[in-house]
Image (spheres, rainbow, N blue to C red):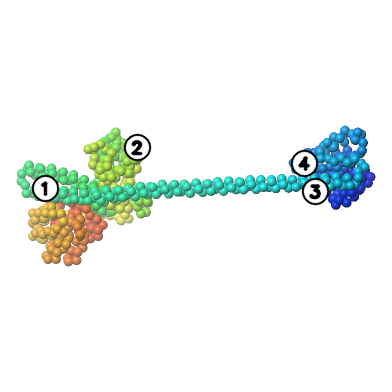
């Protein structure tokens, strides 16, 4: 339809003649009988229109002008007007219409057939070029739309990829931060382990020295009659006691403190500490002890837990010089976090409303001898003892603090499903008045410690033999069977537990006392049980009671 030529020549045979001339050029034609029909066919599509001047005057001007103005940018529709020869006689309306048509060819009649055919052919070719331009414009428009679509898709992909990269970067930064935290934690653990080994070794040796001093002072007290000498010995023994407490704290930090773990009701234990804590912190501090509503049982050394709570209470008091509130709370938690296996734990938290600890010091508070107190106001072993006790009991100790808002130290211990409704075990029996010449073999690698124990047992009336190491002691055991063994735990080549194992191969029922201040309590418990352990430093009375109890039990 876009290739046809519209013919509007309503008078006579003009339309038929024009149609015949164009047909000789193989041009498609359509004769329009009226102006309205021609306008309708223009809307449908045509390559050109041939009109006579008089028919042009019959076309409604407004619809034709509207159609012309609505042409797209690529379109300049060609008109061929067959006009009369008298141009001067042409009306103003005809001239205005010719100007309105724009792309118009005026052929004066009579028109030669060849001229008309060429004019029509030229108009159709011009229209075809307009169609080509339309196609190019459409292709450009389609291309532009496709480019915009691709640009939009590209931008969406860029946004999505940027989002993915941002997420990957966030994950990478989180992994880096987590790795840094893990490395910092590992370094802290390694540091604490190294300090613990060093501290434990020093404390063990110092503990043996204190033991020698303590037992010799005890011997002096038993043989001396001068009151002045007895007073000096008593004061010296008091100093030994303070030194023993310090070494105990050091061994606790090193996780080598000899503990006596028993099934303990933590609620009852802390409730019994209420008055002692209140006296320790003074009247300016309000004490709030809150036991747990549910049972809170754990296997631990009750004395060490009491000491840990008192150490924390004293630290809290020092942080609240103007008074404040000290809270000791017990709870049973479902998990202990990443540092311990999952399971129920008994948590004991001690919190205060004091000055708090600066953030850069939090990683150091569990280090031995580290303290924020003035020089001479503390040993710096309280928190290290808490840390070591919790670790050795199978738990963990943590600290949270904010400057100006107080500090919370929390200890967590594995909860026990067992219950103990009966009374605690009775204390050891009193030593016998006479040792009845019973034989005791002392196996101890430290010569001074061994000498003090041997002299003490000899003074008590026992027949005492001695050995400097495990191999020598086992050889003496094979030659003559004693009634009792007193064995040190930490010895070279063969520790006390191994000596006891070998000794019981010769005599399974021989009673044994393990003297130690530095022991692997799991191994000791497997071999002996805690009832046969003497904690260094001990005095002669404690030694006598332990020996008497062991011999009576046999």
Q: CA distance from mark 1 to mark 4?
A: 124 Å
Give the residue displayed 34% in from the left and 37% down from the top.
Answer: 403
CA gap between label 2 and label 1 equals 47 Å
Residue that carries the numbered disc 3 in the rendered image: 2
Residue at point 8%, 48% (across, down): 220
Furthest residue toward left:
225
Query: Disc 3 and disc 1: Cα gap in Å?
Result: 129 Å
Q: Nearer the viewer, mark 3 or mark 2?
A: 3
Q: Which residue is mark 4?
A: 71
Q: Which residue is mark 2?
A: 403
Please give the name of the residue rendered at 18% of the width and 44% of the height, measured from the top-left corner. Answer: 242
Choose the circle earlier in sequence order: 3 or 1.
Answer: 3
Residue 194, given in percent of the width and then of the height, sits at 28, 50
- Hey, which quadrant is residue 503 in on the image? bottom left
Is residue 499 in sight in this rendering? yes
Q: Secondary structure at mark 3?
A: loop
């Amino acid at each position: 339809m876009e290739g046809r030529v519209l013919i509007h020549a309503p008078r006579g045979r003009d339309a038929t003649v024009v149609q015949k001339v164009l047909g000789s050029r193989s041009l498609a034609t359509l004769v329009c009988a009226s102006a309205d029909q021609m306008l309708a066919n223009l809307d449908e599509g045509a390559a050109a229109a041939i009109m006579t001047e008089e028919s042009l005057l019959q076309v409604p001007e407004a619809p034709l002008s509207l159609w012309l103005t609505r042409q797209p940018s690529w379109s300049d529709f060609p008109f061929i007007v067959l006009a009369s020869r008298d141009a001067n006689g042409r009306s103003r309306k005809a001239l205005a219409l010719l100007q309105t048509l724009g792309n118009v060819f005026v052929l004066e009649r009579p028109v030669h057939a060849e001229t008309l055919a060429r004019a029509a052919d030229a108009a159709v070719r011009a229209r075809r070029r307009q169609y080509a331009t339309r196609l190019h414009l459409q292709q450009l428009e389609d291309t532009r739309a496709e480019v915009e679509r691709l640009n939009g898709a590209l931008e969406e992909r860029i946004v999505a990829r940027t989002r993915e990269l941002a997420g990957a970067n966030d994950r990478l930064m989180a992994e880096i931060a987590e790795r840094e935290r893990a490395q910092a934690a590992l370094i802290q653990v390694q540091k604490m382990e190294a300090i613990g080994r060093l501290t434990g070794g020093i404390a063990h040796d110092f503990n043996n020295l204190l033991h020698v001093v303590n037992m010799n002072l005890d011997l002096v007290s038993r043989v001396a009659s001068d009151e002045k000498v007895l007073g000096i010995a008593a004061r010296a023994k008091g100093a030994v006691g303070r030194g023993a407490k310090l070494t105990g704290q050091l061994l606790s930090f090193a996780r080598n403190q000899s503990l006596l773990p028993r099934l303990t009701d933590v609620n009852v234990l802390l409730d019994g500490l209420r008055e002692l804590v209140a006296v320790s912190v003074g009247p300016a501090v309000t004490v709030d002890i809150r036991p747990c509503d549910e049972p809170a049982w754990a296997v631990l050394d009750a004395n060490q837990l009491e000491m840990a709570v008192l150490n924390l209470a004293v630290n809290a008091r020092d942080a609240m010089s103007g008074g404040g509130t000290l809270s000791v709370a017990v709870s049973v938690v479902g998990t202990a976090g990443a540092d311990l296996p999952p399971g129920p734990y008994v948590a004991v938290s001690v919190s205060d409303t004091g000055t708090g600890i600066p953030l850069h010091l939090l990683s150091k508070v569990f280090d031995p001898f580290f303290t924020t107190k003035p020089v001479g106001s503390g040993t710096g072993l309280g928190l290290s003892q808490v840390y070591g006790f919790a670790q050795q009991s199978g738990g963990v100790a943590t600290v949270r603090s904010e400057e100006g808002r107080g500090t919370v130290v929390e200890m967590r211990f594995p909860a026990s499903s067992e219950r103990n409704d009966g009374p605690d075990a009775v204390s050891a029996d009193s030593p016998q008045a006479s040792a009845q010449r019973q034989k005791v073999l002392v196996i101890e690698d430290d010569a001074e410690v061994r000498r003090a124990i041997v002299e003490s047992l000899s003074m008590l009336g026992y027949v005492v033999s001695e050995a400097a190491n495990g191999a020598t002691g086992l050889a003496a055991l094979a030659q003559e069977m004693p009634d009792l063994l007193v064995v040190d735990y930490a010895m070279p080549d063969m520790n006390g537990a191994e000596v006891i194992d070998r000794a019981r191969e010769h005599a399974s029922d021989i009673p044994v006392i393990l003297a130690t201040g530095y022991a692997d309590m799991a191994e000791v418990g497997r071999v002996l049980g805690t009832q046969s352990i003497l904690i260094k430093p001990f005095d002669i009375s404690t030694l006598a009671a332990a020996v008497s109890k062991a011999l009576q039990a046999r």
